[in-house]
Image (spheres, rainbow, N blue to C red):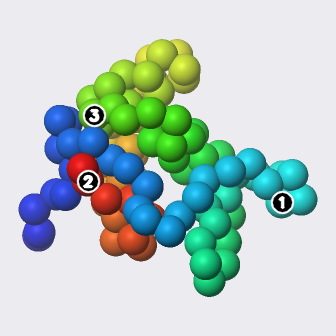
Amino acid sequence: MSEAIFKADSVPVLAQGYRFQWEPAQDCNVLLYPEGMVKLNPAAGEILKRINDKKQTVAELIAELKVAFNGADLDDDVYQFLEEAHDNSWIRAE
């Protein structure tokens, strides 16, 4: 198993060439890039919205999500999404 890219003190940011936005025609958040668009599910949209809005550590991001979602245990899901988003070249660790 490879070492995780993101740790609690990592700061995820959108990769160059990607733009996060709400797309009314799709009725969801999307990631736009020169070759196309990625439609995001609600959970991915909530995570990427926070990454797009401000620079914060993964620990701060998870804490903010826990407040927004009544203390739900989101840690593993957030880390898994961040790794998948990194593997898809949507984000990078700063």
Quarter of the rendering containing residue 41: bottom right
Report the residue at 45% width, 42% height from top: 51
| Kind of element beneath mark 1 | loop
Q: Do the residues labelled 1 and 3 touch (CB within 8 Å)?
A: no
The residue labelled by disc 2 is 93
Question: In the figure, 74 relative to 14: above or below?
Answer: above
Q: Name the residue under label 3.
A: 57
* Mark 1 or mark 3, earlier in chain: 1
Where's residue 87, x and y in %? Answer: 34, 71
Going by the numbered disc 1, the residue's amino acid type is Gln
Quadrant location of residue 81? bottom left
What amino acid is labelled 2 in the image? Ala
Q: In this view, does 56 lie to the left or right of 9?
A: right
Gap in Å between the C-alphas at discs 1 and 2? 28 Å
Around disc 2, counting alpha carbons within 10 Å, would you say few (fewer than 14), some (14 to 19), or many (20 or more)?
Answer: some
- Quick one: 25 or 71, which is closer to the camera? 25
Image coords of residue 3 (percent x, y):
10, 62
Residue at 58% over, 58% down: 19
Q: Is mark 3 on a helix, strand or loop?
A: loop
Residue type at mark 3 is Thr
Can see residue 41? no
- Which corner quadrant of the image does residue 43 belong to? top right
Q: In this view, does 88 lie above or below 77?
A: below
Mark 2: secondary structure = strand
Q: Which of marks 1 and 2 is nearer the N terminus?
A: 1
Mark 1 — residue?
26
Residue at the bottom extreme, as displayed: 35
Using the numbered discs, state the Cα–Cα distance from disc 1 to disc 3 in whole angstroms. 30 Å
